[in-house]
Image (tube, rainbow, N blue to C red):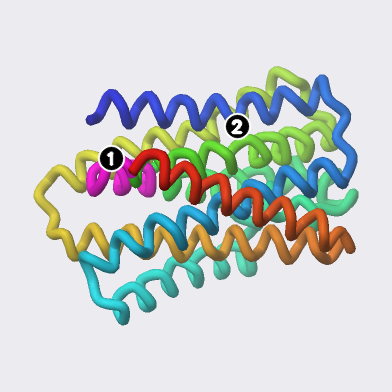
Amino acid sequence: MLPEILLKSLLIVLSALIGALSVFFVKLNHHKLCAIISVSAGALLGAAVFVIIPEVSSLISIYQIIISAGTGYLLFWGISKYYFHVCPACSASHFDEQTTKKFSEIVLTLITALSFHSFMDGLALTSGNIHSHSDGNSIFAAILTHKFPEGLALAALMLGANYSRKKILLYVVLIQSTTIFGAVTGYFLLQSGVSSVFLGLIMAHVAGGFVYLALHAILGEMLKNHKLLVLSSFGGGMLLIYLVHLLVH
């Protein structure tokens, strides 16, 4: 189980790294970036709606799901509102030129927020694998899809702040590596004999965070007046995870 979790975690980091590398070789206009972000947002919401919540409904009550998912949503909302955007990809439309130029002043804040986000991704990956191998694959597909635009947005922000390519890639790898740390932490925590109720609460909490990231991303992109593109790409992302979920089952 642990080798599989580590392999998936490494692939997730690789997805973010490929996203970062694409900034140097592919010119992305706002329409393309909008589509990529919307697909990844749909994938996260699909993981929460089609995979995590249905699974935890057999472990905890509906009231516990609502409360735990609500805490996950509010936690990410609070970090984004009072600390810093917890997901560069979800907030790509909100980064103005002034923010980019001041990146060197906010880099520690961004690293902290994004590292927490990646840690939770790793915890979600492990929770899904331990509870159900097939659901672990669905969650893995959602996180993998989301990491590409996340690495891309982070690299684009750093590039605009005149960071060297070497430093950009180093930052992306270091930040995204907290996904591995979260996965390993989750593995040893959940292998220590925790109750199924606790596992259900963790997964519902993560689902709430996924819902926040998805809604934050799609609403942010729709403000740019690409509603049809956003909604179609968002729906495609949700459909992708639903099909993956059906296939692995």
Q: Is residue 114 left or right of residue 140?
A: right
Image height of 192 relative to 46, above or below: above
The residue under label 2 is 16
The image shows residue 177 at horizontal and vertical percentages of 47, 31
* Nearer the observer, 96 or 145: 145
Residue 88, visible in the rendered structure:
no
> Residue, x 82% and y 60% (percent of image)?
228
* Nearer the observer, 4 or 150: 4
Going by the picture, which residue comes out furthest to the left? Answer: 193
Going by the numbered disc 2, the residue's amino acid type is Ala
Q: Nearer the viewer, mark 1 or mark 2?
A: 1
The residue under label 1 is 133
Q: CA distance from mark 1 to mark 2?
A: 23 Å
- SS class of the residue under badge 1? helix
In the rendered image, which quarter is residue 196 located in? Answer: bottom left
Q: Which residues are magenta?
A: 123-134
- SS class of the residue under badge 2? helix
